[in-house]
Image: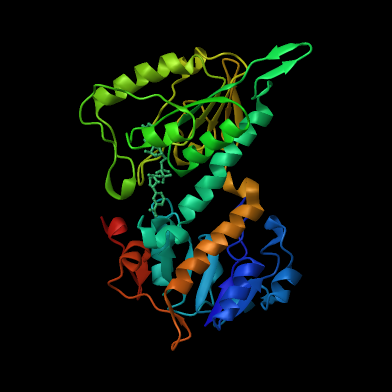
Amino acid sequence: VRIAVLGETAAGEPRVAATPETVKKFAGLGATLAVEAGAGAGAAIADADYAAAGATIGDRASVLKDADILLGVQGPDPASLAGAKPGAWLVAGLNPFGERARVDAYAAAGIEALAMEFMPRITRAQSMDILSSQSNLAGYKAVVDAASIYGRAFPMMMTAAGTVSAARAFIMGVGVAGLQAIATARRLGAQVSATDVRSATKEQIQSLGAKPIFVENVSGIEGEGSGGYATEMSEEYKKAQADLVSSHLAKQDIVITTALIPGRPAPRLISDAQIATMRPGSVIVDLAVEQGGNVEGAVAGEIVEKHGVKIVGFRNVPGRLASDASALFARNLYNFLSAFWDKEKGGPVLPDEDEITQAIRLTKDGKVVNQRLLG
Ligand code: NAD
């Protein structure tokens, strides 16, 4: 098969969907690779590095020509795929709910769109999961960003001039990003606490040496739905959580919010009134800002100051670590495609009845076929 690596055209997207390492591995499986010129620039990978790994380099039209598989980080503008072979696979993070019109356009163009963020949360697919690999880096970077913006130190320091007290960091939402945020804040020497609606996270928080902050004595709050994802909570639970969090928040210096509910806007976790109770100089990083935000007043792409508290809303946080993010993303794509490699056919084959196929395939033969999109 012929695999095309697309240059990213979305604003503020420095990542790339293949690295020289994965190019070499695909070539080892017998694939031919074509990389769009400049595709790796944002991740510090030169065209010459891809060429040395065995790829040809060309413009969009030349890499698309005869390609069987198109690799991207984000879904490309369908118009930019003119000239792609009907039946070609598009393998990328396609934001299917947010970019529904694009999904329809991919179908109309005969592209088979495979949305990597719909990868099921099963053991076999862990190494293919872009949400996990990118969230992990985002959780780390959120804490490092907070530390650089915060006007004080994280660790307790005893100096000849006196003692600097440790920062108190509170992580809200303990999925993949939150766990890494806890670990990172601990490494930097903060006093760390964390909360989530899934009670299973309590032990994970403790095992990382942080303090769990949990609503007790409210019934029916398991909070865990299909695939280990969070569900929307009852009004009673939301009220109890807000009260508990309010008193805790007022004592925090650093807050990292990561709460998401798939297919819905991010839950609101912090109100403006709660921010007003925090110490001036505190920093809140809202990792859910692009999904609607966990924090009232957070603005995507900006650092906003309210009541003396800085609310950080950086976009594309994994992209702020573009080299590592690309390396992991590229391996997720390789792990996926190589797992389905058919040696005789010389390329990947997705069985219709496979759980992974059913979860990630958005379009086939000119139609939208994904159950989550068809509703
Ligand atoms: P996510 O990105 O969907 O959400 C982040 C966290 O926010 C979750 O822990 C969620 O419970 C929490 N949250 C949602 N609403 C909240 C609220 N109102 N208040 C506080 N917290 C709230 O989560 P994720 O990182 O995708 O992880 C979810 C689970 O899936 C974890 O248990 C993770 O280990 C698991 N997982 C499994 C696989 C696999 O098996 N292949 C891969 C990735 C993740």
Q: Nearer the viewer, residue 368 or 3?
A: 3
Query: In this view, which residue lies farthest toward the left?
Result: 219
Residue 338, given in percent of the width and then of the height, sits at 48, 73
Horizontally, residue 32 falls left or right of residue 40, namely: left
Q: Residue at x 51, y 65 (%)?
A: 333
Horizontally, residue 25 falls left or right of residue 90, namely: right
Visible residue check, residue 255: yes
Total labels: the figure holds 0
Query: In this view, which residue lies farthest toward the bottom?
Result: 344
Quadrant housing the C terminus = bottom left
Residue 185, given in percent of the width and then of the height, sits at 57, 32
Q: Residue at x 47, y 19 (%)?
A: 272
Residue 166, given in percent of the width and then of the height, sits at 62, 20
Residue 236, given in percent of the width and then of the height, sits at 24, 23
Horizontally, residue 262 falls left or right of residue 211, namely: left
Picture layout, residue 50 above or below residue 198: below
Quarter-of-image position of residue 107: bottom left
Quarter-of-image position of residue 270: top left
Horizontally, residue 281 falls left or right of residue 93, namely: right
Query: Which quarter is ligand 1 in?
Result: top left
Q: Residue at x 66, y 64 (%)?
A: 39
Q: Nearer the viewer, residue 177 or 360?
A: 177
Q: Nearer the viewer, residue 368 or 121?
A: 121
Visible residue check, residue 9: no
Picture colour scheme: rainbow
Picture layout, residue 231 above or below residue 28: above
